[in-house]
Every structure is written in structure tokens, then in C-alpha cells.
Image (cartoon, helix red, strand yellow):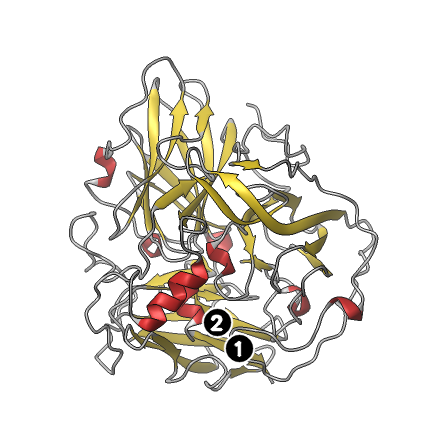
Amino acid sequence: MTRVDPTASRSADPGLPRRALVLGGLGLLGATVLSGCSTADDVRPGGGHGHDNGRSFGPPAGATPAPGQRVLERTLVARPATVDLGGPTVATWVYDDLLPGPLIRATAGDLLRVRVDNRLPAETTVHWHGIRLVNHADGVPGLTQAPIVQNASYTYEFTAPDPGTYFFHPHVGVQLDRGLYAALIIDDPREPGGFDTEWVIVLDDWLDGTGRTPEDALAELERGTGTAHDHGSMMGGSGSSSGSDTDTDMGMGMGPAPWGNAGDVTYPHFLVNGRVATAPEAFTARPGQRVRLRIINAASDTIFAVALAGHRLTVTHTDGYAVVPQEVPAIYLGMGERYDVVVTLGDGIFPLVAQPFGKQGVGRALVRTGAGTPPPVDLVPAELSGEVLIGSQLRPAESSRLPAREPEVLLPVVLEGQMQPYRWTINGAAYGANTPLRVQAGQRVRLRVSNHSMMTHPVHVHGHTFALGTSGLRKDTVLLRHMETRDLDFDADNTGSWMVHCHNAYHGEAGMMIELAYR
């Protein structure tokens, strides 16, 4: 049985998608060896999400490899580019002139050194989503580093301790809703296999360069004009939360809404690997092959339901952690979530469909194992008309469980918000005005997250992974539906100042973030 070589180059990896064509003679820039870390002149203090907290930052701390530790060095260039999405041509911002950006692949335990050259007309950072890394490499401006100013560089150095499917993106404003994102795959040196090849699937909602930018969309939301779906008043309040830690009462199909209100922004396009549905990425294989799909929702405002027509998916991992394998027809992915699934392929041409929840449009790729004509672009797989798995229903593999231990501190995290005026808060205030969550090293911490709004929120915790309530499912990002409460347990074993926030980019920028600070 053939396995993907995790040390293979990007161009040689059969599991990597063809990315959207970048126009205008920019050329492709591959990974290069770094010459060293940035200097203090490369960065400036302050920055962050709409406020300056007064912290100052020096150059990033260098890391010395442990004896025998492999060092993986890369350079990313962030810059404007013109991109062909498979018909629509848009001006946007990308990494290394690629959409999605260049896949970075390492093995658990490797030391990564990634130099980011900022050629954008704005400051930026890179956040390594889901990685339990050192605090200074987390990429949150004003909290863990100064932002990287225009024409400056910053070198991120961190050890990737856990295998899994991750991705990276900026943590400045709503830059995530441009083309600045890419997959980060950390291979398991003890990987048991069980599949013939793998494909990386990156989902996105797209508006940049279509006559609007993400900043335009945010301004329209703040003005109460133009882009938002009709959510009614969406007023936050003290309504009773469910207290539930299960999803047994949730509607499972695409008909009854399991998510309440699921997004604020109207998008003209939904992408799979940088391509619109009318010009899809095509993956080829042979009938009977087992393929691992690493699926990443890099969208800013959209929950997707994903299905491969005529097939069932066996879910094996979520957010990098193994689960008890579960066979399902389709699965929901919230913003920032990742799922690994294995599928045995039939004979023919099959659409891989990403259906945005509560929105018009579709994302699509094709899987070809035989001759035939592709199905029409508006085909809705039967798998999406029945039950769609909500990932929090999964159960952890024994190897993924936190050691049994009672929490020593319980911290409330209350999510509230409204559409007019456009304001989203945690614990009664927007980021910068709310009081940080305080923990001590060595504690078992329980975050009791209560969603007191009618919007679904993907909650992401930086620098740690958590276990869901009584199930123990390990994740770093979880969807909370309207008026739902969940307990997130984690060990305070990674000292620093970290972000806890909604991974809807517009909610985060409007204030739905809070600092998790070690005493």
C-alpha cells in the first residue's frame, strides 16, 4: 500500500491541489533557507485588533534545536496579487503568489523556522492555528508580538509537538477573509497508514476583489447596510442557556436549522482549493482506493456541510486528535475546524460538495476514478439531504483523552452580541475592555462557555487543546449554537498570554475576543 512521503516536495506530492492561477507575471516563489531572525527595527510595539494595549516587544526569541531535532526552514512572502479563481479574476493578498498558500509539511517534534516577509500595504502577522507552540510565536499583534510592518520581516520559531491537520493565517483585522491562508500538516512518525493517498481540501468563502474588500464588508456591517443577512435584532441577553453538553436535540439535516443564524456576510463565491464550483479542482484515483481527506475550513463567516456524492466518509480525526472512527454521509465544519476522513472510492466522476449553511451558492471539487461526464454544478448530493454529522458528537480515541482530573478553577466565558450596532462581546465587553481570564501554571482549568446570542460561534483557544465536557473529545475549535453552553477543560501547561475568541473573523474584529493570561 503506497503512502504519501511527508518529506516530498510540494510539486511532487500527489495529495496537493492545483492552486488558483496567479496572473500578472509575478512568478512563483518557493521555500528558501533562512539567514536568521528579524531585528528590532523590523517590528513596532502596539497594534492588535483595533486598540493599542501599550505592550512593547523586542525581536523574536531564537530557538536552539535539541540534539537530533530536525529543523525545517521556510520563507513566506505576503503580497498583493491578481488571482484567477477559475473564471472570476480578483485582486487580493496571498502568500508566495499561491491560493491557497504553500503547504508547509513537517513531522511532529520538528523545529520550524518560518520567515515572513511582509510586502503588503498593511501590517500583518501569522497565526499557526491549532499548534501548541511557544507564546511569542503565536502571531497575535499587541499580545504576543508587534505586528510586522510593511517591507519588514519576522521569523517564527516553534516546535510542532502534535501530529495533525492545521493551517496558518493572519491575526490582523479581517485579513483572513483575503487569500492569506494555507495548510500546515504535521505528520505522525508512527502513522499506521490504512489509506493509499491523501488530498488536502481547503474551503473558503470569497468576496475580496469582487467590487468589495473584507474591510468594506466590515464597514457595511458596522453601518448596518448592505452585506448582512436579516438576523432580526440579534440582541444578546441573559436568556437561559441549555447547559447541554450533547447535540441530541439538534436538527441534523440541511432542512431544520441546527445552527440558528450562521453568518453575517453575503458572499459571491465559495471556493474549494482556490477554485469556484464552475471550474473545480479535479482529483484522480483508481476505483477501490482508500483516500484520506484532510479538510480545513479556512472561511471567515461560513459553516459548510461537506459530502462526496455516492460515498460515505469515515471520520478519523478532528483538530489533529484521533476519534473513535465513525462512518457518516456528511459532516459540518465550522470556521477554523479541521477533520480527517477516509473514503473508499467508487468508479466514476463524483462531486465533492461544500454546501454553505444558510447561504446561497456552493463550493465543489471533482473526484475522477473513471470515464464519464461531470454532474451538473447544481447537483446536491443525496448525502446532504439526510443526517449531517456535527463534529462535537464524536467520541475521542483513548489516546486522545486528557488524564482524568477535576478542574481546580472554573472561568465563565459569556458570548453576547447584536447586529445594530454591530458589536460582539465576551463577559460583557469587547476585547481590550473585558477582564482577562486568569489561570496559574499547573491548574486543570474549565472554561464554561455560554452563547447568549442567536448566532452560532466557533470558539477557538490559542496555545492549548481542550476536552469537551463529559465526552472528553479533544479539539481547539468548537461550534456553539445559539443559547448553548459547553464546558471546555484544559491543562494550564503553556505559560503566556493567549487569545480565546470567536473564529468568525467579523465577530472577532467587532470585539468577541478575550485574553487568557497566566499569573
Q: What numbered label is drawn on residue 516?
A: 1
Q: Is residue 472 visible?
A: no
Q: Looking at the image, which is closer to me, 420 or 106?
A: 420
Could you say where residue 117 lies in the image, as x and y percent from the top left? Answer: 70, 55
Q: CA distance from mark 2 to mark 1?
A: 7 Å
Q: Is residue 497 visible?
A: yes
**Residue occupying the point 33% across, 72% down:** 223
Secondary structure beneath label 2? strand
Secondary structure beneath label 1? strand
Could you say where residue 455 lies in the image, as x and y percent from the top left? Answer: 28, 66
Image quadrant containing the C terminus = bottom right
**Which residue carries the number 2 mark?**
500
Residue 54 falls left or right of residue 223: right
Image quadrant containing the N terminus = top right
- Residue 287 drawn above or below residue 130: above
Residue 384 falls left or right of residue 423: left
CB under 8 Å between callouts 2 and 1? yes
Q: What numbered label is drawn on residue 178?
A: none
